[in-house]
Amino acid sequence: MKSMHWGIIASAALAVGLSIGCSTVDAQTRPPRHQHMVDRLHRVAIRFNTFAAVPNDPRGRVAYGTERGNVYVLEFENGYYRSIWSSPSMATRIQEVQFADLDGDGRYALIAYNTRGHLAIWNIDDFSVRWESPETQFNSIEALTTAQVDRDPQLEILFMSEGRLFIYDGKHFVEEWRSQQIFDATDIVVGDVDGDGEPDIILNTGFVLDAFARSLKWESLDEFGEILELADIDGDGKLELISGSVGATKVWDIDMRREKWE
């Protein structure tokens, strides 16, 4: 989750950003003024849950969700972004928009969910519906990410709903697992944080799970923070957990089960 508080103002920021023109030439040869615009939109995608950019996309496609429940896809053409598609309304405010190559074929899927837990996934090339949750299946979705958490070729979709962690297959969209334990998390990251060569699932409420076994490895006495990221910041070959909240940042050594440099 990129932020917990920016969804409502994402459209306003987008409107300001899209008023500046850009070139259609390749990013490596794009003039600095035009490159600045592209970089600005990518910064918006990093900061706002409701805005996402297709990674390394020569067409420069981006998507954003609105308070009215629509998802718009824009494409870079003739120096400006233009709208090329909008979804049917999902009835309530879009809570998050993401792109992911779910089945490893190099083609990205567009993922969005709203404040009532309605989850939809579209093919980005023709905007056909790849999967859509029944409207009453989930009452809410608090966080979502995609990652490889088993040993099949496709990614899995991990999300929190009403305090429980769900894992869905990213190709057939069937439920693989749901937690019995209530975690009440609002952010999820996945990575090898203890150096055992296998991925871990980290929840911002202080829980670390073995991604393959789906078992609890560690529960911190303190919550990690509102926003989570992973990076090997000290070069030891292990990912550190960087957690943030309003006015504070923490760095965790999960393998040592403590804050780093404390």
Image (spheres, rainbow, N blue to C red):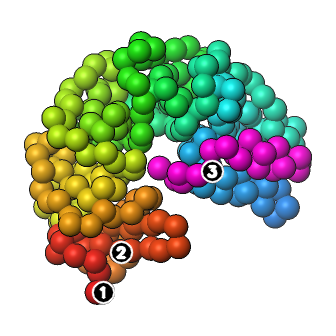
Task: Give the quadrant of residue 255.
Answer: bottom left
Picture coordinates of residue 180, whole percent (x, y): 15, 35
Residue at left offset 81%, top offset 50%: 17
Q: Which residues are magenta?
A: 1-25
On whether residue 182 falls in the magenta region, the answer is no
Q: Is residue 238 visible?
A: no
Q: Which residue is mark 3?
A: 6
Q: Mark 2 or mark 1: which comes first in sequence?
A: 2
> Which class describes the residues within 10 Å of circle 3: few (<14), some (14-19), or many (20+)?
some
Alpha-carbon distance for marks 1 and 3? 31 Å
Alpha-carbon distance for marks 3 and 2? 23 Å
Task: Give the quadrant of residue 253.
Answer: bottom left
Q: Which residue is mark 1?
A: 261
Residue at left offset 11%, top offset 46%: 215
On whether residue 8 falls in the magenta region, the answer is yes
Alpha-carbon distance for marks 2 and 1? 8 Å
Residue type indicated by callout 1: Trp
Q: Which mark is residue 253?
A: none
Picture coordinates of residue 160, whole percent (x, y): 34, 38
Q: Which residue is mark 2?
A: 251
